[in-house]
Image (cartoon, helix red, strand yellow):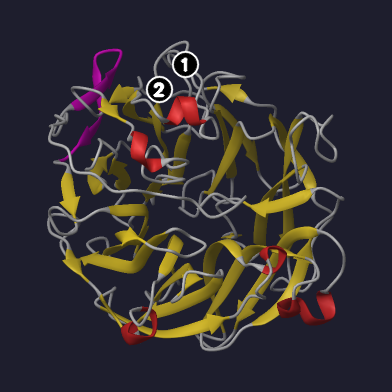
Amino acid sequence: MDRRGFLAVTGSVAAGAVEFLAGACAQANGKSEFTVGPVRRVGAEGAKYFEPWIAANPRDGSNLVIVGSRYLGEAATRATERMEPVAWFTADGGATWSAGEFEGTALWRRGLPYFADSYASYAPDGTAFCVFNGSPEGDRLDLWIYHSDDGGRHWRGPTILASSPTRRGLLDYPRLAADLNGGKPRLFVAVAVDGNAPILGKWKRPGYGCAILRSDDGARTFSVVNFLAPTTLQHDPINSPLVLPDGRLLVGFGDYPADPSEKGPRGDITHGRTYAAVSRDGGATFSTPVPICDTLVEDGFVVLAADRSDSPRRGRIFAVRHSRTSRPSGLGVQTSDDGEVWTPPAAVPNLRAGPIPHAAVAVSSRGVLGLAWIQGQPGEEVRIFDPAWTAREHPWDLYFTASVDGGATFTAPAPRLITSSRTDPKLSSRPYGTDYIALAAPPNGSFHAVWVDSRPGKWEIQTAKIEAPG
Protein backbone atom coordinates (compact mmCIF):
# COMPACT_ATOMS: atom_id res chain seq x y z
CA MET A 1 0.00 0.00 0.00
CA ASP A 2 1.20 3.51 -0.67
CA ARG A 3 2.55 4.94 2.55
CA ARG A 4 0.98 8.36 2.10
CA GLY A 5 -2.72 7.52 2.16
CA PHE A 6 -5.44 5.08 1.19
CA LEU A 7 -5.92 4.41 -2.51
CA ALA A 8 -8.99 4.42 -4.74
CA VAL A 9 -9.45 1.52 -7.16
CA THR A 10 -12.25 0.79 -9.59
CA GLY A 11 -12.77 -2.49 -11.38
CA SER A 12 -13.04 -3.34 -15.06
CA VAL A 13 -12.74 -6.44 -17.21
CA ALA A 14 -10.69 -6.59 -20.41
CA ALA A 15 -9.50 -9.38 -22.67
CA GLY A 16 -5.94 -9.91 -23.85
CA ALA A 17 -2.99 -12.23 -23.68
CA VAL A 18 0.60 -12.03 -22.61
CA GLU A 19 3.09 -14.65 -23.76
CA PHE A 20 5.86 -15.86 -21.48
CA LEU A 21 9.33 -17.20 -22.14
CA ALA A 22 8.67 -20.34 -20.11
CA GLY A 23 11.47 -22.84 -20.21
CA ALA A 24 13.86 -20.41 -21.86
CA CYS A 25 17.51 -20.25 -20.88
CA ALA A 26 19.42 -17.05 -20.29
CA GLN A 27 22.94 -17.08 -21.64
CA ALA A 28 26.15 -15.16 -21.10
CA ASN A 29 29.08 -15.72 -23.44
CA GLY A 30 27.20 -18.62 -25.01
CA LYS A 31 26.80 -20.51 -21.76
CA SER A 32 23.42 -21.33 -20.27
CA GLU A 33 23.13 -19.56 -16.92
CA PHE A 34 19.59 -20.09 -15.65
CA THR A 35 16.27 -21.58 -16.75
CA VAL A 36 12.77 -20.25 -16.09
CA GLY A 37 9.96 -22.76 -15.73
CA PRO A 38 6.32 -22.30 -16.73
CA VAL A 39 4.47 -19.24 -15.50
CA ARG A 40 1.69 -20.30 -13.14
CA ARG A 41 -1.48 -18.41 -12.33
CA VAL A 42 -2.15 -18.29 -8.58
CA GLY A 43 -5.74 -17.85 -7.44
CA ALA A 44 -9.14 -18.25 -8.98
CA GLU A 45 -9.57 -17.40 -12.64
CA GLY A 46 -11.37 -14.10 -13.05
CA ALA A 47 -10.67 -12.93 -9.50
CA LYS A 48 -8.63 -9.77 -8.99
CA TYR A 49 -5.65 -9.65 -6.63
CA PHE A 50 -3.15 -7.09 -5.38
CA GLU A 51 0.24 -6.89 -3.66
CA PRO A 52 1.37 -10.54 -3.46
CA TRP A 53 4.39 -11.69 -1.47
CA ILE A 54 6.15 -15.06 -1.64
CA ALA A 55 8.19 -16.88 1.02
CA ALA A 56 10.02 -20.22 0.99
CA ASN A 57 10.22 -22.85 3.72
CA PRO A 58 13.92 -23.12 4.72
CA ARG A 59 13.44 -26.80 5.65
CA ASP A 60 11.49 -27.95 2.59
CA GLY A 61 12.35 -26.86 -0.96
CA SER A 62 8.93 -27.93 -2.24
CA ASN A 63 6.94 -25.74 0.17
CA LEU A 64 6.31 -22.05 -0.46
CA VAL A 65 3.49 -19.67 0.40
CA ILE A 66 2.04 -16.62 -1.34
CA VAL A 67 -0.12 -14.07 0.44
CA GLY A 68 -2.03 -11.17 -1.07
CA SER A 69 -5.31 -9.26 -1.15
CA ARG A 70 -8.42 -10.10 -3.16
CA TYR A 71 -10.40 -7.19 -4.59
CA LEU A 72 -14.10 -7.30 -3.65
CA GLY A 73 -15.35 -4.06 -5.17
CA GLU A 74 -15.73 -0.42 -4.27
CA ALA A 75 -16.90 0.77 -0.87
CA ALA A 76 -18.10 3.99 0.70
CA THR A 77 -15.27 3.92 3.22
CA ARG A 78 -12.07 5.83 3.73
CA ALA A 79 -10.24 3.20 1.68
CA THR A 80 -12.86 3.44 -1.15
CA GLU A 81 -12.34 -0.25 -1.91
CA ARG A 82 -12.95 -3.63 -0.33
CA MET A 83 -10.16 -6.22 -0.13
CA GLU A 84 -9.76 -9.37 1.95
CA PRO A 85 -6.67 -11.43 2.86
CA VAL A 86 -5.86 -14.48 0.73
CA ALA A 87 -3.09 -17.08 0.83
CA TRP A 88 -1.90 -20.08 -1.16
CA PHE A 89 0.65 -22.83 -0.61
CA THR A 90 2.52 -25.30 -2.76
CA ALA A 91 3.88 -28.69 -1.71
CA ASP A 92 5.42 -29.54 -5.09
CA GLY A 93 7.82 -26.68 -5.71
CA GLY A 94 5.34 -24.38 -7.41
CA ALA A 95 3.86 -26.81 -9.94
CA THR A 96 0.44 -26.42 -8.29
CA TRP A 97 -0.96 -23.95 -5.78
CA SER A 98 -3.83 -24.47 -3.33
CA ALA A 99 -5.73 -21.94 -1.23
CA GLY A 100 -4.81 -21.69 2.43
CA GLU A 101 -7.47 -21.30 5.12
CA PHE A 102 -7.58 -18.48 7.65
CA GLU A 103 -9.06 -18.68 11.11
CA GLY A 104 -11.28 -15.78 12.14
CA THR A 105 -12.56 -15.00 8.65
CA ALA A 106 -15.89 -13.92 10.16
CA LEU A 107 -14.05 -11.03 11.79
CA TRP A 108 -13.07 -9.44 8.49
CA ARG A 109 -16.05 -10.52 6.42
CA ARG A 110 -18.61 -8.87 8.64
CA GLY A 111 -18.34 -5.43 7.11
CA LEU A 112 -16.45 -3.61 4.37
CA PRO A 113 -12.94 -5.01 4.79
CA TYR A 114 -9.80 -3.36 3.59
CA PHE A 115 -6.55 -5.34 3.97
CA ALA A 116 -3.30 -4.60 2.10
CA ASP A 117 0.50 -4.70 2.44
CA SER A 118 0.64 -8.49 2.69
CA TYR A 119 3.96 -10.03 3.71
CA ALA A 120 5.11 -13.53 4.70
CA SER A 121 8.19 -15.10 6.24
CA TYR A 122 9.32 -18.45 7.64
CA ALA A 123 11.15 -19.22 10.86
CA PRO A 124 14.09 -21.66 10.63
CA ASP A 125 11.92 -24.49 12.00
CA GLY A 126 9.40 -24.17 9.14
CA THR A 127 6.75 -22.12 10.95
CA ALA A 128 5.23 -19.61 8.53
CA PHE A 129 4.02 -16.14 9.49
CA CYS A 130 2.08 -13.53 7.53
CA VAL A 131 0.78 -10.04 8.17
CA PHE A 132 -1.79 -7.71 6.63
CA ASN A 133 -2.71 -4.18 7.59
CA GLY A 134 -6.26 -2.92 7.52
CA SER A 135 -9.57 -3.46 9.28
CA PRO A 136 -12.99 -5.05 8.76
CA GLU A 137 -14.56 -1.61 8.37
CA GLY A 138 -11.88 -0.19 6.08
CA ASP A 139 -11.34 2.79 8.35
CA ARG A 140 -7.96 2.12 9.97
CA LEU A 141 -4.67 0.26 9.55
CA ASP A 142 -4.38 -2.34 12.29
CA LEU A 143 -1.93 -5.23 12.01
CA TRP A 144 -3.42 -8.72 11.56
CA ILE A 145 -0.78 -11.40 12.08
CA TYR A 146 -1.24 -15.14 11.45
CA HIS A 147 0.98 -18.21 11.81
CA SER A 148 0.94 -21.63 10.16
CA ASP A 149 2.48 -24.87 11.41
CA ASP A 150 1.59 -26.91 8.32
CA GLY A 151 3.21 -25.11 5.40
CA GLY A 152 0.47 -22.57 4.79
CA ARG A 153 -2.51 -24.92 4.66
CA HIS A 154 -4.06 -23.42 7.78
CA TRP A 155 -3.34 -19.97 9.21
CA ARG A 156 -3.96 -19.62 12.94
CA GLY A 157 -4.91 -16.39 14.66
CA PRO A 158 -5.22 -13.57 14.07
CA THR A 159 -3.27 -11.57 16.59
CA ILE A 160 -4.55 -8.03 16.09
CA LEU A 161 -2.40 -5.04 16.98
CA ALA A 162 -4.71 -2.04 17.03
CA SER A 163 -3.72 1.34 15.67
CA SER A 164 -5.16 4.64 16.82
CA PRO A 165 -8.02 6.12 14.75
CA THR A 166 -5.98 9.11 13.54
CA ARG A 167 -4.03 9.05 10.28
CA ARG A 168 -0.77 9.58 12.13
CA GLY A 169 -1.45 6.61 14.39
CA LEU A 170 -1.96 4.05 11.64
CA LEU A 171 0.39 1.06 11.49
CA ASP A 172 1.70 1.00 7.94
CA TYR A 173 3.87 -1.14 5.67
CA PRO A 174 4.66 -4.03 8.07
CA ARG A 175 7.53 -6.41 7.35
CA LEU A 176 8.48 -9.67 9.12
CA ALA A 177 11.51 -11.77 10.00
CA ALA A 178 11.81 -14.76 12.33
CA ASP A 179 14.55 -16.67 14.10
CA LEU A 180 14.69 -19.28 16.88
CA ASN A 181 15.15 -18.35 20.52
CA GLY A 182 15.47 -21.26 22.90
CA GLY A 183 14.39 -23.54 20.08
CA LYS A 184 11.10 -21.67 19.57
CA PRO A 185 10.15 -19.22 16.80
CA ARG A 186 10.70 -15.57 17.61
CA LEU A 187 9.05 -13.05 15.30
CA PHE A 188 10.10 -9.47 14.53
CA VAL A 189 7.87 -6.86 12.88
CA ALA A 190 9.09 -3.56 11.47
CA VAL A 191 6.25 -1.11 10.85
CA ALA A 192 5.92 2.60 10.14
CA VAL A 193 4.02 4.59 12.76
CA ASP A 194 3.85 8.04 14.30
CA GLY A 195 6.06 8.36 17.38
CA ASN A 196 3.11 9.37 19.56
CA ALA A 197 0.98 6.34 18.69
CA PRO A 198 -0.45 4.58 21.76
CA ILE A 199 1.06 1.22 20.75
CA LEU A 200 4.58 2.54 21.40
CA GLY A 201 4.09 2.85 25.17
CA LYS A 202 7.37 3.89 26.80
CA TRP A 203 8.92 4.37 23.36
CA LYS A 204 6.58 7.26 22.50
CA ARG A 205 8.32 10.41 21.31
CA PRO A 206 7.90 12.97 18.50
CA GLY A 207 8.59 11.90 14.95
CA TYR A 208 7.45 9.37 12.40
CA GLY A 209 9.58 6.26 12.32
CA CYS A 210 10.06 2.52 12.26
CA ALA A 211 8.72 0.62 15.25
CA ILE A 212 10.30 -2.77 16.04
CA LEU A 213 7.84 -5.26 17.55
CA ARG A 214 8.79 -8.69 18.85
CA SER A 215 6.90 -11.83 19.75
CA ASP A 216 8.55 -14.55 21.83
CA ASP A 217 5.53 -16.89 21.75
CA GLY A 218 4.93 -17.56 18.07
CA ALA A 219 2.97 -14.38 17.19
CA ARG A 220 0.42 -14.75 19.97
CA THR A 221 1.53 -11.62 21.83
CA PHE A 222 3.82 -8.74 20.94
CA SER A 223 5.80 -6.02 22.65
CA VAL A 224 7.43 -2.90 21.22
CA VAL A 225 11.19 -3.23 21.71
CA ASN A 226 12.45 -0.17 19.84
CA PHE A 227 11.56 2.84 17.70
CA LEU A 228 13.94 4.05 14.98
CA ALA A 229 13.53 7.70 13.96
CA PRO A 230 17.00 9.27 13.97
CA THR A 231 16.04 12.51 12.14
CA THR A 232 13.08 14.92 12.01
CA LEU A 233 12.03 13.49 8.64
CA GLN A 234 9.61 10.60 8.14
CA HIS A 235 11.00 7.06 8.22
CA ASP A 236 9.54 3.97 6.55
CA PRO A 237 10.84 0.38 6.73
CA ILE A 238 11.97 -1.24 3.51
CA ASN A 239 11.90 -5.01 2.91
CA SER A 240 13.45 -5.88 6.25
CA PRO A 241 14.10 -6.81 9.07
CA LEU A 242 16.67 -9.41 8.12
CA VAL A 243 18.01 -12.02 10.54
CA LEU A 244 21.69 -12.44 9.66
CA PRO A 245 23.50 -15.79 9.93
CA ASP A 246 25.26 -14.71 13.13
CA GLY A 247 21.92 -13.90 14.80
CA ARG A 248 22.04 -10.13 14.44
CA LEU A 249 18.89 -8.30 13.37
CA LEU A 250 19.27 -5.74 10.57
CA VAL A 251 16.59 -3.16 9.85
CA GLY A 252 16.60 -0.97 6.75
CA PHE A 253 14.51 2.18 6.44
CA GLY A 254 14.27 5.31 4.34
CA ASP A 255 13.74 8.91 5.34
CA TYR A 256 12.05 11.71 3.40
CA PRO A 257 10.17 14.98 4.12
CA ALA A 258 6.57 14.62 5.27
CA ASP A 259 5.39 16.71 2.31
CA PRO A 260 7.93 16.63 -0.53
CA SER A 261 6.16 19.34 -2.53
CA GLU A 262 7.85 22.69 -2.97
CA LYS A 263 5.19 24.36 -0.81
CA GLY A 264 5.29 21.77 1.98
CA PRO A 265 7.52 21.60 5.04
CA ARG A 266 11.10 20.75 4.12
CA GLY A 267 10.12 21.02 0.48
CA ASP A 268 13.65 22.11 -0.33
CA ILE A 269 14.86 18.57 0.43
CA THR A 270 15.03 16.74 -2.89
CA HIS A 271 16.68 13.51 -1.74
CA GLY A 272 15.76 10.82 0.74
CA ARG A 273 18.26 8.53 2.40
CA THR A 274 18.22 4.80 3.11
CA TYR A 275 19.76 3.61 6.38
CA ALA A 276 20.64 0.30 8.02
CA ALA A 277 20.76 -0.36 11.76
CA VAL A 278 21.89 -3.57 13.47
CA SER A 279 20.84 -5.12 16.79
CA ARG A 280 22.74 -7.82 18.67
CA ASP A 281 20.15 -8.26 21.46
CA GLY A 282 16.87 -9.04 19.74
CA GLY A 283 15.97 -5.45 18.93
CA ALA A 284 16.40 -4.01 22.43
CA THR A 285 19.26 -1.79 21.24
CA PHE A 286 20.55 -0.87 17.79
CA SER A 287 23.77 0.46 16.39
CA THR A 288 23.76 4.05 15.17
CA PRO A 289 21.94 3.94 11.80
CA VAL A 290 24.38 4.25 8.93
CA PRO A 291 23.55 5.59 5.44
CA ILE A 292 23.46 3.16 2.54
CA CYS A 293 22.64 5.61 -0.25
CA ASP A 294 20.62 8.68 -1.23
CA THR A 295 17.63 8.59 -3.59
CA LEU A 296 15.37 11.19 -5.13
CA VAL A 297 12.23 11.78 -3.05
CA GLU A 298 9.26 9.70 -4.29
CA ASP A 299 11.53 8.24 -6.96
CA GLY A 300 14.35 6.01 -5.74
CA PHE A 301 13.96 2.83 -3.71
CA VAL A 302 16.18 0.17 -2.13
CA VAL A 303 15.61 -3.56 -1.54
CA LEU A 304 17.75 -5.74 0.74
CA ALA A 305 18.81 -9.39 1.03
CA ALA A 306 21.38 -11.36 3.02
CA ASP A 307 23.44 -14.41 2.08
CA ARG A 308 22.56 -17.16 4.58
CA SER A 309 24.16 -19.93 2.50
CA ASP A 310 27.35 -21.81 3.30
CA SER A 311 29.17 -20.05 0.46
CA PRO A 312 32.37 -18.05 1.09
CA ARG A 313 30.17 -14.91 1.15
CA ARG A 314 27.94 -16.12 3.97
CA GLY A 315 26.67 -13.13 5.92
CA ARG A 316 27.13 -10.61 3.10
CA ILE A 317 24.27 -8.12 2.78
CA PHE A 318 23.10 -6.73 -0.56
CA ALA A 319 21.28 -3.44 -1.19
CA VAL A 320 19.83 -2.85 -4.67
CA ARG A 321 18.73 0.63 -5.71
CA HIS A 322 16.24 1.36 -8.50
CA SER A 323 14.38 4.40 -9.80
CA ARG A 324 10.99 5.32 -11.26
CA THR A 325 12.52 8.05 -13.42
CA SER A 326 15.88 6.44 -14.28
CA ARG A 327 17.73 9.04 -12.22
CA PRO A 328 20.01 7.20 -11.75
CA SER A 329 19.28 4.63 -14.40
CA GLY A 330 19.37 0.85 -14.06
CA LEU A 331 20.11 -1.08 -10.87
CA GLY A 332 22.86 -0.16 -8.41
CA VAL A 333 24.21 -2.93 -6.15
CA GLN A 334 25.94 -2.24 -2.82
CA THR A 335 27.32 -4.79 -0.38
CA SER A 336 28.28 -4.92 3.27
CA ASP A 337 29.83 -7.65 5.37
CA ASP A 338 28.66 -6.18 8.68
CA GLY A 339 25.70 -3.87 7.89
CA GLU A 340 27.73 -0.82 8.91
CA VAL A 341 30.21 -0.23 6.07
CA TRP A 342 28.74 -0.27 2.55
CA THR A 343 30.45 -0.27 -0.83
CA PRO A 344 29.59 2.44 -3.37
CA PRO A 345 26.82 1.50 -5.84
CA ALA A 346 27.97 -0.63 -8.77
CA ALA A 347 25.74 -0.72 -11.85
CA VAL A 348 24.35 -4.04 -13.06
CA PRO A 349 25.72 -4.19 -16.64
CA ASN A 350 23.89 -4.54 -19.94
CA LEU A 351 20.49 -3.26 -18.77
CA ARG A 352 18.38 -1.53 -21.37
CA ALA A 353 17.08 1.98 -20.78
CA GLY A 354 13.81 2.64 -19.00
CA PRO A 355 12.51 3.26 -15.46
CA ILE A 356 12.46 0.44 -12.92
CA PRO A 357 9.49 1.01 -10.58
CA HIS A 358 9.77 -2.34 -8.77
CA ALA A 359 12.65 -4.71 -8.06
CA ALA A 360 13.29 -7.76 -5.87
CA VAL A 361 16.44 -9.42 -4.61
CA ALA A 362 17.25 -12.74 -2.95
CA VAL A 363 20.25 -14.99 -2.33
CA SER A 364 19.88 -18.70 -3.05
CA SER A 365 20.92 -21.52 -0.75
CA ARG A 366 24.00 -21.89 -2.98
CA GLY A 367 25.05 -18.27 -2.54
CA VAL A 368 23.76 -17.05 -5.93
CA LEU A 369 22.46 -13.47 -5.98
CA GLY A 370 19.20 -13.16 -7.95
CA LEU A 371 17.57 -9.93 -9.16
CA ALA A 372 14.12 -9.52 -10.71
CA TRP A 373 12.55 -6.27 -11.84
CA ILE A 374 9.89 -4.71 -14.02
CA GLN A 375 10.97 -2.01 -16.44
CA GLY A 376 9.16 0.64 -18.44
CA GLN A 377 9.96 1.99 -21.86
CA PRO A 378 13.11 4.03 -22.62
CA GLY A 379 12.59 7.74 -22.09
CA GLU A 380 9.54 7.27 -19.89
CA GLU A 381 9.15 8.37 -16.28
CA VAL A 382 6.80 6.54 -13.91
CA ARG A 383 4.60 9.17 -12.23
CA ILE A 384 2.09 7.30 -10.07
CA PHE A 385 0.87 10.51 -8.41
CA ASP A 386 0.16 12.19 -11.76
CA PRO A 387 -3.47 11.52 -12.87
CA ALA A 388 -2.57 12.28 -16.48
CA TRP A 389 0.10 9.55 -16.41
CA THR A 390 -1.96 6.90 -14.61
CA ALA A 391 -4.93 7.53 -16.94
CA ARG A 392 -2.97 5.94 -19.81
CA GLU A 393 -1.69 2.41 -20.38
CA HIS A 394 2.08 1.96 -20.20
CA PRO A 395 3.96 -1.15 -21.41
CA TRP A 396 6.43 -2.89 -19.14
CA ASP A 397 8.65 -5.98 -19.15
CA LEU A 398 9.84 -8.44 -16.51
CA TYR A 399 13.55 -9.30 -16.25
CA PHE A 400 15.84 -11.55 -14.23
CA THR A 401 19.60 -11.78 -13.80
CA ALA A 402 21.94 -13.66 -11.44
CA SER A 403 25.45 -13.38 -10.04
CA VAL A 404 27.53 -16.32 -8.80
CA ASP A 405 30.34 -14.14 -7.43
CA GLY A 406 28.60 -11.82 -5.00
CA GLY A 407 27.66 -9.13 -7.49
CA ALA A 408 31.01 -8.79 -9.27
CA THR A 409 29.57 -10.10 -12.56
CA PHE A 410 26.05 -10.91 -13.76
CA THR A 411 24.40 -13.08 -16.36
CA ALA A 412 22.89 -11.26 -19.32
CA PRO A 413 19.57 -9.73 -18.17
CA ALA A 414 16.82 -11.83 -19.72
CA PRO A 415 13.20 -10.73 -20.36
CA ARG A 416 10.53 -13.10 -19.14
CA LEU A 417 7.71 -11.84 -21.41
CA ILE A 418 7.56 -12.35 -25.18
CA THR A 419 5.25 -9.35 -25.49
CA SER A 420 5.17 -6.48 -23.01
CA SER A 421 2.55 -6.32 -20.31
CA ARG A 422 0.64 -3.08 -19.65
CA THR A 423 -0.40 -1.00 -16.70
CA ASP A 424 -4.05 -0.57 -15.82
CA PRO A 425 -5.41 3.01 -15.95
CA LYS A 426 -8.06 2.00 -13.41
CA LEU A 427 -5.48 1.27 -10.70
CA SER A 428 -4.61 4.86 -9.75
CA SER A 429 -1.44 4.70 -7.62
CA ARG A 430 -0.99 0.96 -8.23
CA PRO A 431 -0.80 0.81 -12.02
CA TYR A 432 1.28 -2.40 -11.79
CA GLY A 433 -1.21 -4.07 -9.44
CA THR A 434 1.23 -3.85 -6.56
CA ASP A 435 3.67 -1.64 -4.69
CA TYR A 436 6.33 -4.37 -4.81
CA ILE A 437 7.33 -7.63 -6.46
CA ALA A 438 8.99 -10.48 -4.56
CA LEU A 439 11.63 -13.17 -5.02
CA ALA A 440 11.95 -16.21 -2.73
CA ALA A 441 14.90 -18.60 -2.43
CA PRO A 442 14.03 -22.18 -1.32
CA PRO A 443 16.74 -24.49 0.12
CA ASN A 444 17.09 -26.35 -3.21
CA GLY A 445 19.01 -23.50 -4.86
CA SER A 446 16.19 -22.16 -7.04
CA PHE A 447 14.31 -18.85 -7.03
CA HIS A 448 10.59 -18.17 -7.27
CA ALA A 449 9.35 -14.80 -8.52
CA VAL A 450 5.85 -13.39 -8.02
CA TRP A 451 4.20 -10.40 -9.71
CA VAL A 452 0.82 -9.16 -10.93
CA ASP A 453 -0.41 -9.33 -14.51
CA SER A 454 -1.61 -5.72 -14.59
CA ARG A 455 -3.28 -5.71 -17.99
CA PRO A 456 -6.52 -3.68 -17.72
CA GLY A 457 -9.05 -5.68 -15.74
CA LYS A 458 -6.76 -8.70 -15.27
CA TRP A 459 -5.00 -8.24 -11.89
CA GLU A 460 -3.84 -11.87 -11.81
CA ILE A 461 -1.05 -13.16 -9.55
CA GLN A 462 1.63 -15.02 -11.48
CA THR A 463 4.74 -16.88 -10.40
CA ALA A 464 7.60 -18.78 -12.00
CA LYS A 465 10.41 -21.01 -10.77
CA ILE A 466 13.92 -20.02 -11.83
CA GLU A 467 16.75 -22.54 -11.82
CA ALA A 468 20.00 -20.64 -11.31
CA PRO A 469 23.65 -21.72 -11.49
CA GLY A 470 25.75 -22.46 -8.45
Is residue 29 inside the magenta stretch? yes
Residue at image point 49% right, 84% down = 159
Start and end of the magenta stretch?
Answer: 25-37
Nearer to us in this view, 90 or 311: 90
Q: Residues within 10 Å of mark 1 (few under 14, many from 20)?
A: some
Q: Residue at x 45, y 17 (%)?
A: 354
Task: Answer yes or no: is residue 58 visible.
Answer: no
| Relative side of 253 to 36, left or right | right
Q: Disc 1 marks which amino acid?
A: Glu
Q: Vertically, is 72 above or below 350?
A: below
In this rendering, would 127 be left or right of 233? Answer: left
Circle 2 SS class: loop
Coordinates of residue 240 in the picture (x, y in percent): 58, 56
Marker disc for residue 380? 1
Find residue 96 and report its image quarter. Answer: bottom left
At 23% from the left and 46% from the top, the residue drawn is 462
Q: Residue at horizontal 32%, vertical 86%?
A: 106
Crowd around label 2: few <14 · some 14–19 · many ≥20 (10 Å)? many
Q: State the image quarter where residue 88 is shown.
A: bottom left
Magenta segment's dominant SS is strand
**Residue 386: x, y in percent?**
53, 30
Asked whether disc 1 touches disc 2, contact meaning CB atoms under 8 Å apart, the reply is: yes
Q: Of helix, strand and loop, which one carries label 1?
A: loop
- Any mark on residue 376, and which? 2
User: With 269 as the anchor, is 224 left or right in this view?
Assistant: left
Res. 256 in view: yes
Q: Is residue 368 above or below residue 221?
A: above
